[in-house]
Amino acid sequence: MKISELVKHTHVSKETIHYYVREGLVSKPKKLGKNVAFYEESCINQIKTIKRLQDNYFLPLSVIKKIIKTHKTKPDTEQLSFEVLSELIKPMDYFLASEISGREAFRKATGLGRKWLAKMEGWGVITPAGENGNSVYSQDDVIIGKLIVEMDHTGYDPGDGTDPEDLRRIADFIHEYIITAQKSFFQAKGSELSPEELREKKVRIREIMSLFFYHLYRKLVRESLDLFEDVQESKEDEIKVPLTHQSTRRSG
C-alpha cells in the first residue's frame, strides 16, 4: 500500500512513519520508483503496536525499539500474543475511576449489550453491588466486561464451536476454590496476623494467584494447540504418502 493508505489506517503522519522506518521500528517499504514506495500490510500492526505501547505504557521509542526487536525473533504465535496484550492490557485502567454506577453507564463504558450483561450477572461473572437501588460495578467488572466484548469480536460464540456458558463454569469453579482456600487460610493464620498484616497478605496472594491463573491458562492452551497442530500435520503426511505411491504406480 502507499504511504497515504498507511496514514489513513493508522492515523499517524507521514513524517512519523518515515521516522519509524529510519529508526528500524517499522519494516522498510519496497521502492517502486523515485517517489513511490510500497508498504506491506504488516506495517499497520507494527505502527499500531508502537502507538499502544506509547499510549498504554508511556514507553520511550528507544525502549519500544528493543521490545519490538526482541519479539521479531519470536514465533508468529508469540508475536501475535504480544500484539494482543499490548492492545488489551492498559495499566492506566487500574489508576482511573475504580467504579461505575448504573447499568447504562457500565454498558457505555464496556460496549456490552443488555442481553449479555444480564447473562453475565446471572452467571456470577459480573457482580455489581447494590447502592441506593442502583448497580455499582467494580473496576474488575469493567475490565471483564470489555474483555467479554473482545471475546465476541474474536469469535467466542456457538457459531465458532465455543460455548459462552463456559464463562459461568469458570466463575463457579474459581469462586468455589477461593471460598475453600480463604476459609483454610483464615482458620490457620487469621488469628495470628494483625489487620494490617492480614490486608497486605491478602493483596499479595490475590495478585500472585491472578498471575498464576493467567499463565497457567496460557501454558495449557499453547500446549493443546501445539498438540492439535502435530496431529493435523501427521494426518496431512498420511494423506500425502498414498498419493505419492499412487502416482508412482500410474507412471510405471
Image: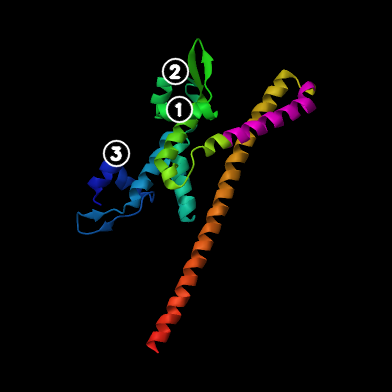
Q: Position of residue 170 (x, y in %)?
A: 58, 37
For label 3, the residue is 11
- Judge whether 71 appears above or below 151 on screen: below
Above or below residue 128? Residue 19 is below
**Residue at image coords 53%, 58%:** 228
Residue closer to the observer: 205 or 73? 205
* Circle 3: element type: loop
Mark 1: give few (<14), some (14-19) or many (20+) Cα within 10 Å: some
Dot 3, crowdedness within 10 Å: few (<14), some or many (≥20)? few
Q: Residue at the location (23% across, 50% down)? A: 2
**Label 1: which residue?**
117
Rounded to the nearest whole Å, what is the CA distance between mark 3 and mark 1? 32 Å
Q: Position of residue 33 (x, y in %)?
A: 20, 59
Front residue of 86 and 177: 177
Of callouts 3 and 1, the N-terminal one: 3
Q: Give the mark toward the camera: 3 or 1.
A: 1
* Amino acid identity at mark 1: Leu
Q: Amino acid at mark 2?
A: Gly
Q: How is the image coloured?
A: rainbow
Q: Nearer the viewer, residue 110 or 71?
A: 110
Which numbered mark, 2 or 3, is in the foreground of this view? 2
Residue 143 percent coordinates (x, y) = 48, 30
Q: Which residues are magenta?
A: 170-191
Image x and y of residue 244, in percent: 43, 79
Q: Main secondary structure of the magenta part?
A: helix
- Give the residue number, with chain letter if any, for mark 2: 102
Q: Secondary structure at mark 1?
A: helix
